[in-house]
């Protein structure tokens, strides 16, 4: 999609925040007809972060809440459009709060493996 670079620049702070807390590479990726921030973990897990129902807003300073979703590909690292299974979701006004909430949901369900996601402690 032609605006991936633009969104990467626009969401540089969000990308840096997720990279810092997860100690993993972050990227703006295609998400349907829009974009999302993606962080890949081991064992075929990844998260997508968006701040609108469709994807990333054209205005990162908009009043939109963040949604962070964790997916499991069954260990194959598949693309989000290939039928990965959503395993947790959280919404919050701030990206960091949405991330913390989704990790808390994963922990409560017994789906958080510290060794699999080393460095992603909230």
Image (cartoon, rainbow, N blue to C red):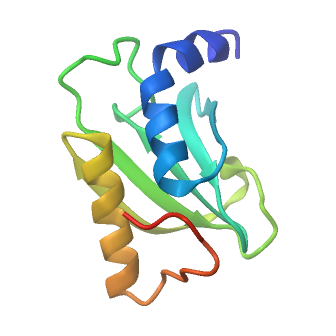
Say above or below: 2 vs 51.
above
In the drawing, does residue 93 fall left or right of residue 32?
Answer: left
The image shows residue 10, relative to residue 49, as above or below, that is above
Where residue 43 appears, as percent x and y from the top left, is 72, 74
Query: At 77% across and 74% down in the image, what residue appears?
Result: 75
Q: Quadrant of residue 74?
A: bottom right
Q: Residue furthest bottom?
A: 110
x then y, percent, for residue 97: 25, 51
| Left-right relation of 55 to 117 | left
Single out the residue that lies furthest toward the right: 76
Return the x and y of residue 100 as percentages of the image width and height: 31, 61
Q: Quadrant of the C terminus?
A: bottom left
Q: What residue is shown at x 55% (from left), y 44% (from top)?
A: 19
Identify which residue is drawn at 48% across, 80% down.
Answer: 112
To which quarter of the image does residue 26 belong? Answer: top right
Nearer to me, 65 or 95:
95
Picture coordinates of residue 109 (x, y %)?
Answer: 37, 87
Residue found 59% across the figure and 44% down from its top: 38
**Quadrant containing the N terminus in the rendered view:** top right
Q: How many marks?
A: 0
Residue closest to the eye, 79 or 108: 108
């Amino acid at each position: 999609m032609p605006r991936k670079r633009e969104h990467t620049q626009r969401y540089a702070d969000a990308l840096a925040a997720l990279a810092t807390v997860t100690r993993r590479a972050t990227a703006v990726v295609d998400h349907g007809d829009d974009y999302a921030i993606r962080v890949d973990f081991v064992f075929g897990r990844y998260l997508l972060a968006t701040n609108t129902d469709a994807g990333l807003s054209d205005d990162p300073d908009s009043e939109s809440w963040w949604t962070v979703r964790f997916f499991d590909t069954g260990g194959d690292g598949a693309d989000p459009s290939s039928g990965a299974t959503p395993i947790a979701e959280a919404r919050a006004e701030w990206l960091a709060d949405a991330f913390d909430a989704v990790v808390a949901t994963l922990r409560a369900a017994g789906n958080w493996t510290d060794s699999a996601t080393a460095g992603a402690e909230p």
